[in-house]
Image (tube, helix red, strand yellow):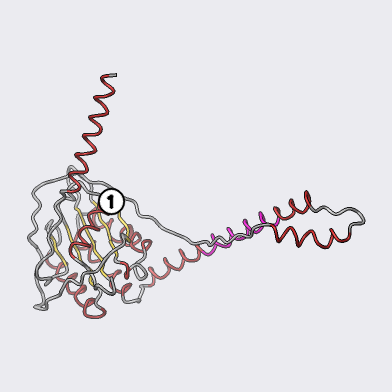
């Protein structure tokens, strides 16, 4: 019995300690001057790709005020990457306050003691142009293979090359085909559900008619009225059918020594402002 109490107290202490670590996680402060849209605090993006990525994101911002921010960090400080991204998104105010069209890409590189993690986190207004399924596809098809080769700059550049036209409503052919296929799958699932529930409804009406309104040989009134009565008293289904998607979550080990000094280089003297955008937690996560 004594050992049981000790085990319970020990488990409770672990829970409290874990919660405290999450609450005290070191979130990078909002940059005072948003001169860049790439913040390579983990120092994993080569200068050539960094300049290309930054220019692409600035051009997108000029085009329709879509603010896509790239952030690499050495550690997530024990937080789930989804929670970490939400904290950064809200603290920095990514995207326009009215449009909520911000997108945050967070990369935690793989180390000897912890796996690599990536998340594309979308604002409310970006979820239509950048749905969760598309975020996941970008990670699995374009980012993860390059991450496994330790080419972080190429991985992020590939993601930006897909996100940028998507936020403009100009889906590349492979992305358009992917989204069309998923929409067709949802339609097929909806039709199958309608057919199945329709058959069950007809069977239920038949059983009610058979057991409660089965007409006698000469009961013509029952013969005429019973199907109508059965259909009237049987509740109709008001179910709506829609597809959905989910994002997996992964935890990471805590590492220390993170530094919030930007490793990006400026290719323009233009100055951006943080718009105060919000996110509902949309997007997708992956690990390698």
Q: Is residue 170 magenta?
A: no
Please provide percent x and percent y for residue 24: 15, 48
Coordinates of residue 144 in the picture (x, y in percent)? 28, 56
Residue at image location 8% in from the left, 49% down from the top: 257
Could you say which quadrant of the image residue 7 lies in?
top left
Q: Quadrant of the N terminus?
A: top left
Q: Nearer the viewer, residue 247 or 109?
A: 247
Vertical comparison of 247 with 224: above or below: above
Which is nearer the eye, 101 or 191? Answer: 101
Determine whether the residue tagged by mark 1 lies in a helix, strand or loop. strand
Identify the magenta region.
187-202
Q: How many marks?
A: 1
* Spot occupied by residue 245 in the image (x, y as percentages of width and height): 41, 58
- Whether residue 229 sits left or right of residue 19 in the image: it is right
Residue at mark 1: 287
The reply, left or right, for residue 135 in relation to residue 261 is right
Find residue 82 and report its horizontal and vertical position in percent: 27, 54
Q: Residues within 10 Å of mark 1 (few under 14, many from 20)?
A: many
Outermost residue toward the bottom? 63
Most prominent secondary structure in the magenta stretch?
Answer: helix
Indicate left or right for 221 with 3 as reference.
right
Query: Relative to the observer, which residue lies in front, 15 or 255?
Result: 15
Residue at image coords 25%, 80%: 63
Indicate yes or no whether the magenta region holds residue 197.
yes
Most extreme residue toward the top is 1
């Amino acid at each position: 019995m004594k050992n049981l109490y000790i085990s319970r107290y020990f488990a409770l202490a672990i829970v409290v300690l874990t919660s405290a670590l999450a609450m005290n996680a070191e979130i990078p402060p909002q940059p005072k001057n948003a001169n860049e849209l790439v913040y390579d605090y983990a120092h994993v993006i080569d200068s050539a790709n960094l300049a290309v990525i930054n220019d692409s994101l600035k051009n997108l911002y000029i085009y329709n005020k879509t603010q896509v921010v790239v952030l690499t960090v050495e550690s997530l400080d024990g937080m789930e990457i989804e929670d970490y991204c939400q904290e950064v998104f809200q603290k920095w105010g990514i995207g326009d306050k009215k449009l909520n069209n911000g997108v945050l890409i967070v990369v935690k590189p793989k180390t000897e003691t912890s796996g690599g993690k990536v998340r594309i986190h979308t604002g409310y207004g970006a979820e239509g142009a950048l749905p969760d399924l598309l975020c996941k596809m970008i990670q699995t098809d374009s980012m993860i293979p390059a991450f496994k080769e330790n080419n972080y700059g190429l991985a992020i550049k590939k993601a930006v090359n897909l996100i940028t036209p998507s936020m403009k409503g100009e889906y590349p052919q492979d992305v358009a085909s992917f989204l069309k296929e998923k929409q067709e799958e949802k339609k097929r699932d909806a039709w199958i559900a309608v057919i199945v529930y329709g058959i069950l409804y007809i069977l239920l009406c038949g059983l009610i008619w058979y057991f409660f309104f089965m007409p006698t040989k000469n009961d013509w009134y029952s013969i005429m009225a019973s199907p109508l009565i059965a259909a009237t008293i049987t509740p109709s289904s008001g179910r709506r059918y829609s597809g959905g998607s989910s994002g997996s979550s992964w935890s990471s080990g805590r590492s220390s020594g993170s530094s919030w000094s930007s490793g990006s280089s400026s290719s323009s003297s233009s100055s951006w402002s943080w718009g105060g955008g919000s996110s509902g937690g949309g997007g997708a996560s992956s690990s390698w």
